[in-house]
Image (spheres, rainbow, N blue to C red):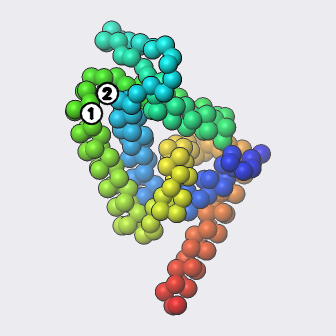
Amino acid sequence: MGKYGLFDLEKHFAFYGAYHSNPINILIHMIFVWPIFFATSLIFYFTPPLFNLPQVELSLFGSNPVVLFFNIGFFLVLIYALFYICLDPKAGSLAALLCGFFWITSCFVASSLGFSLAWKVVLVAQIICWTGQFIGHGVFEKRAPALLDNLVQAFVMAPFFVLLEALQTSFGYEPYPGFHANVQAKIGAQIKEWKENKKLKLHS
């Protein structure tokens, strides 16, 4: 059964899907979206703690312990994870685990690299990933990215969109029966409306 308002997954998915209907563009986003999430988490590791909370040290597989800060990076990842779970408990829980995994991994990488090298790595990763996505839109989708129309929704929904798309394509997963059909109908209607508006602008 669908949800409404902020947690209306059909609405969010249809909005994002209307800008990503070309299979090659979708594949490009599947490759580059989560690395952007990781690179952003990596650079946020160097932001100061937001609250005076006890620091947590974590060591994996005998590695040197890394301090996990409760900073902007942590709380952004937490918000993403909770939002995805609210959208769909099953796929959202998987997305939340991925968010946590990438955050913890980024902390280890950031601690190992140090700020002077980490920001350069992040810059290169962001340039490559964003260039790939803009090529996907310009060459294959032939439509501007969703972020130009709804910046917040595009950034928040992108990781979950590509994960849900991969689950649907590979395993036929649906949050509930009829979800995929409903979303495809809404995507078709939105694309049709966009094409009609585009024609009107060309003839005006």
Q: In the image, residue 124 lies at what x, y percent?
A: 25, 45
Q: In the image, residue 201 lies at what x, y percent?
A: 52, 84
Q: In the image, residue 111 lies at what x, y percent?
A: 30, 23
- The vertical placement of 101 against 185, above or below, is above
**From where the camera sits, is residue 106 visible?**
no
Q: Name the residue rendered at 41%, 63% in the picture.
A: 137
State the residue position of label 2: 110
- The vertical placement of 164 against 106, above or below, is below
Quarter residue 118 falls in: top left
What residue type is disc 1 on?
Ala
Q: Residues within 10 Å of mark 2 (few under 14, many from 20)?
A: many
Q: Name the residue rendered at 43%, 22% in the picture.
A: 69
Q: Is residue 132 left or right of residue 183?
A: left
Q: Nearer the viewer, residue 92 or 21?
A: 92
- Circle on res. 79: none
Q: Residue furthest bottom?
A: 203
Residues marked 2 and 1 touching at CB (< 8 Å): yes
**From where the camera sits, is residue 84 visible?**
yes
Q: Nearer the viewer, residue 98 or 39?
A: 39
Point out the image quarter for the N terminus: top right
State the residue position of label 1: 118
